[in-house]
Image (cartoon, rainbow, N blue to C red):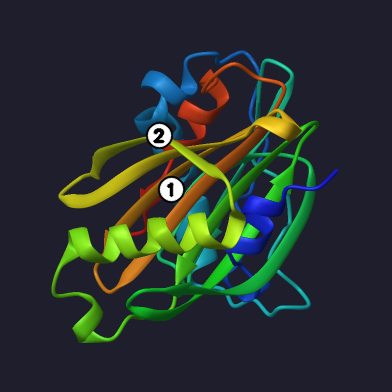
């Protein structure tokens, strides 16, 4: 199964930046992604503090236990991307990572990309290198350049684009489609400080954006 759009666009290579959070929790919390985030954060903040004080290497990411939550058929795991400065919940599945350089009208932008592959889908979290000041003068122009770079690289059809925000940061949501493959790909792209953060989900044989995609996007948090 190929997911040419995300694998050719996003990047996330070094496991130095990826630390699965620890501990095991019960699976009877169906509302976690909607209204249980603060409760869960209180339960794991001591664990996260321990992780902040530890070191990891690409060969040996810290993974003493797995913090997971069962919701429907998917088992969700929390990942901490220290270099990228964020955390996010992703469904368990085959994992992949890569470095990708995206060609844009504002020049090349290098990304670190990490993905999980549950069933007929692909969940991606990516962050860019620290961008030069000249790329940061106009947020809308930068987001548009990244959108166009994604379209050029993947050859997918852009079907919808909407502005979105994360806290005080601006972003855009892109929906793309590959009719021949029956695939829908949804992106959230944010400019946070001097980095671009990209979240994306590719799903096959679906009619629209699923609740799992919304849960994935909504679990994105900046590390303190």
> Is residue 36 positioned above or below 114 on the image?
above
163 or 212: nearer the eye? Answer: 163
User: Disc 2 designates what residue?
Assistant: 218
Residue 54 at x, y = what percent? 56, 73
Q: Residue at x 39, y 56 (%)?
A: 147
Residue 42 at x, y = what percent? 39, 38
Residue 156 at x, y = what percent? 57, 46
Q: Residue furthest right?
A: 1
Q: Local crowd at mark 1 within 10 Å, few (<14), some, or many (≥20)?
A: few
Q: Local crowd at mark 2 within 10 Å, few (<14), some, or many (≥20)?
A: some
Residue 50 appears in view: no
122 or 60: nearer the eye? Answer: 122
Q: Residue at x 60, y 73 (%)?
A: 100
Check the picture and name the quadrant holding the N terminus: top right
Q: Residue at x 30, y 59 (%)?
A: 143
> Is residue 184 positioned above or below 100 on the image?
above
166 or 153: nearer the eye? Answer: 153
The numbered mark at residue 89 is none
Q: Quadrant of residue 10?
A: bottom right
Residue 180 at x, y = what percent? 73, 33
In the rendered structure, the answer to whether residue 79 lies left or right of residue 169 reads right
Pick whichever of labels 2 and 1 is earlier in the sequence: 1
SS at circle 1: helix
The numbered mark at residue 45 is 1
Residue 40 appears in view: yes
């Amino acid at each position: 199964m190929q997911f040419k759009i995300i694998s050719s666009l996003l990047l996330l290579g070094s496991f130095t930046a990826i630390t699965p959070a620890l501990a095991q929790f019960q699976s009877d919390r169906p509302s976690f992604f909607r209204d249980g985030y603060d409760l869960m954060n209180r339960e794991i903040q001591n664990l996260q503090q321990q992780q902040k004080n530890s070191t990891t290497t690409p060969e040996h990411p810290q993974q003493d236990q797995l913090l997971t939550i069962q919701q429907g058929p998917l088992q969700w795991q929390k990942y901490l991307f220290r270099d990228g400065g964020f955390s996010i919940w992703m469904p368990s599945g085959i994992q992949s990572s890569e470095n990708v350089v995206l060609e844009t009208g504002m020049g090349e932008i290098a990304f670190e990309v990490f993905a999980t592959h549950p069933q007929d889908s692909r969940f991606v979290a990516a962050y860019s290198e620290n961008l030069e000041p000249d790329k940061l003068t106009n947020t809308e122009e930068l987001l548009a350049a990244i959108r166009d770079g994604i379209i050029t690289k993947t050859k997918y059809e852009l079907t919808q684009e909407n502005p979105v925000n994360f806290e005080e940061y601006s972003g855009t949501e892109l929906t793309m489609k590959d009719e021949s493959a029956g695939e829908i790909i949804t992106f959230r792209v944010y400019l946070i400080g001097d980095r671009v953060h990209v979240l994306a989900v590719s799903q096959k044989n679906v009619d629209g954006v699923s609740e799992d995609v919304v849960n994935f996007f909504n679990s994105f948090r900046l590390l303190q």
